[in-house]
Image (tube, grey):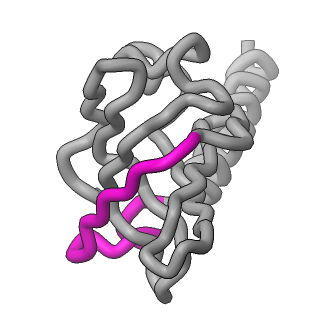
């Protein structure tokens, strides 16, 4: 019985260490995106990537100067995004979308998604940049 207790303790330690590493590796929106800089862009969806745990996609936007800019958008986790209605049927290359979110720190053309209007639907992802 003593060996079983030690094995259980070792197993618990291993699982705990893995969970801590997983939490440490996951970033928060607040560290990556500026909670005080909400932006909105409209354009064409390109390059959709399901990179666990999030969905990333680009939106190609026409600028005032007549050129194009590409914004990289990060969503909630894949399952959470699907649960809110952002499915593969809606989020596909070539679709027109308007995205609102928190701009990347340092002036990058990246955004943490707050909401998206696509396929005639508006889908709220999150209320704060947390």
Using the image as rendered, state which of residue 31 and residue 42 is in the foreground.
42
Q: Which residues are magenta?
A: 28-44
In the rendered view of the protein, which quadrant contains the C terminus? bottom left
Q: Using the rendered view, name the quadrant where residue 45 is placed.
A: top right
Image vertical order of residue 90 relative to residue 58, above or below = above
Task: Check residue 31 for magenta coloring.
Answer: yes
For the point 37% across and 47% down, which residue is it?
Answer: 99
**In the displayed structure, does residue 47 sit left or right of residue 91?**
right
Residue 9 in view (yes/no): no
Counting from the top left corner in percent of width and height, residue 28 is at 44, 60
Q: Residue at x 28, y 58 (%)?
A: 129
Q: Position of residue 48 (x, y in %)?
A: 69, 36
Tell me where residue 127 appears, x and y as whole percent.
19, 45
Near-viewer residue (53 or 62): 62
**What main secondary structure does the magenta stretch of the protein show?**
strand
Q: Is residue 102 above or below residue 81?
A: below
Residue drawn at (56%, 61%) of the image: 71
Q: Is 19 inside the magenta-drawn segment?
A: no
Q: Residue at x 48, y 41 (%)?
A: 75
Quarter of the image for residue 80 reads top left
In the image, residue 103 above or below residue 12: below
């Amino acid at each position: 019985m003593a060996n079983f207790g030690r094995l259980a303790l070792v197993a618990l330690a291993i699982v705990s260490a893995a969970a801590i590493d997983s939490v440490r590796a996951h970033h928060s929106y607040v560290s990556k995106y500026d909670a005080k800089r909400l932006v909105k862009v409209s354009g064409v969806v390109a390059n959709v990537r399901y990179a666990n745990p999030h969905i990333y996609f680009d939106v190609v936007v026409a600028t005032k100067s007549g050129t194009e800019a590409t914004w990289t958008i990060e969503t909630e986790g894949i399952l959470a995004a699907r649960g809110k209605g952002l499915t593969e049927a809606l989020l596909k290359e070539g679709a027109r979308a308007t995205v609102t979110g928190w701009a990347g720190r340092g002036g990058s053309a990246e955004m943490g998604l707050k909401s998206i209007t696509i396929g005639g639907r508006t889908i709220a992802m999150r209320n704060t940049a947390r």
